[in-house]
């Protein structure tokens, strides 16, 4: 799917997540000449994109027309300061897409004229390789066209899930926004445990990484539920069953830990709203 006809886009903040999205969009044909990026600390890669591909780095927002689409990818804690400076250059028809954890539609909308179409979304870093998932919620001002453009932009980074209730974004942030970190930590723990069982550290790290990645790919490609795939690995009275008896302990097992971890992330997302 090409993004060649998506039109002008202003990205505000090209750090880890913003630049992952930008890479995905440029790779899928977003017109560099219609791509504007505001980033006070541009990476070498961002400078290279500006020099070799022609994206506009740190344009003066007072010059030129109001942005057609504005993607907000700064930290939630600086969002109000950034919007106080950038929002006045938007027009009421600028489609605003925020990816900031915790920042509510209401909190973003108060910087823009009444009726501005705004989408609150939460992507994740596998977007950089087109394997992300973004959960999105639109305010009432987002029309069919706005939703279509937003879906195209986000689908170029992976899967898009629209939700009708804004509060679900906090839970989604805790599951898919932060989720890649849990999978990476699982790989780290698995590698450490393998090392403790005698494997050389680098071999243990390779086994853990390929195992986590392979299990994820199998889950998507087979279309089977995770529970069925787990059962397929588990021979009666075998090695996996011995491990799962530990991991599935009711009180101190992975399930209880994960519930606690996800609840903490969702609570933090709700807290960032204030
Ligand atoms: N990293 C992740 O996995 C995810 C991050 N997010 C959200 O994305 C947003 C950005 O997070 P990261 O990329 O991880 O943080 P980051 O710190 O890597 O990027 C933020 C960028 O904003 C820039 N910035 C600061 N002040 C600015 C200004 N006045 N104008 C323009 N840019 C400015 C910073 O220089 C930095 O490069 C956050 O709101 C976060 O909640 C959402 C989903 C996943
Ligand atoms: O840790 C964070 O706050 C951001 C939002 C989801 C992933 N990273």
Image (cartoon, rainbow, N blue to C red):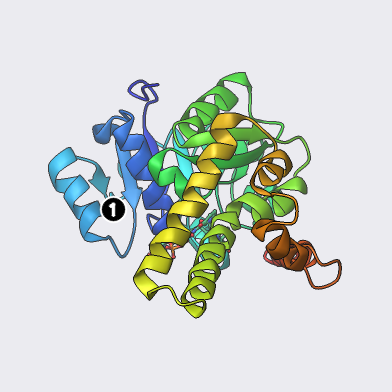
Residue drawn 76% across the image and 46% down it: 168
Residue drawn 56% across the image and 58% down it: 183
Q: Quadrant of residue 14?
A: bottom left
Label 1 CB less than 8 angstroms from ligand 1: no
Does residue 274 appear in the picture of this structure? no
Q: Disc 1 on helix, strand or loop? A: loop
Total numbered labels placed on residues in the image: 1
Is the residue 260 above or below the residue 123 in the image? below
Q: Nearer the viewer, residue 92 or 46?
A: 46
Mark 1 is surrounded, within 10 Å at the Cα level, by few (under 14), some (14 to 19) or many (20 or more) other residues, namely some
Q: Could you tell whether 200 is left or right of 232 in the image?
A: left
Q: Nearer the viewer, residue 112 or 191?
A: 191
Residue drawn 76% across the image and 35% down it: 164
Q: Position of residue 254 (x, y in %)?
A: 73, 65
Question: Residue at the front extreme?
Answer: 237
Q: Could you tell whether 190 is left or right of 230 in the image?
A: left
**Position of the N terminus by quadrant:** top left
Q: Which residue is mark 1?
A: 58
């Amino acid at each position: 799917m090409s993004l060649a006809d998506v039109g002008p886009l202003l990205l505000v903040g090209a750090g880890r997540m913003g630049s992952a999205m930008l890479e995905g969009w440029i790779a899928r044909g977003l017109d560099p000449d219609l791509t504007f990026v505001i980033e006070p600390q541009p990476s070498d890669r961002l400078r290279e994109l500006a020099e070799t591909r022609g994206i506009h780095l740190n344009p003066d927002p007072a010059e030129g027309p109001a942005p057609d689409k504005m993607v907000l990818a700064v930290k939630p804690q600086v969002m109000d300061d950034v919007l106080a400076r950038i929002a006045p250059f938007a027009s009421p028809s600028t489609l605003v897409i925020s990816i900031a954890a915790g920042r509510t539609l209401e909190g973003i909308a108060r910087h823009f004229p009444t009726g501005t179409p705004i989408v609150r979304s939460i992507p994740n870093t596998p977007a950089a390789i087109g394997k992300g998932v973004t959960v999105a919620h639109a305010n009432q001002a987002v029309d069919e066209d706005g939703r279509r453009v937003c879906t195209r932009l986000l689908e170029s980074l992976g899967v898009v899930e629209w939700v009708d209730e804004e509060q679900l974004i906090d839970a989604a942030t805790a599951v898919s926004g932060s989720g890649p970190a849990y999978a990476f930590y699982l790989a780290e723990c698995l590698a450490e445990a393998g090392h403790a069982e005698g494997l050389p550290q680098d071999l243990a790290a390779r086994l853990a990484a390929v195992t986590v990645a392979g299990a994820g790919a199998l889950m998507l490609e087979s279309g089977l539920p995770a529970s069925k795939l787990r059962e397929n690995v588990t021979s009666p009275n075998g090695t996996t069953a011995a491990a799962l008896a530990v991991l599935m302990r009711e009180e101190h097992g992975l399930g209880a830990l994960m519930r606690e971890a996800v609840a903490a992330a969702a609570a933090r997302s709700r807290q960032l709203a204030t």
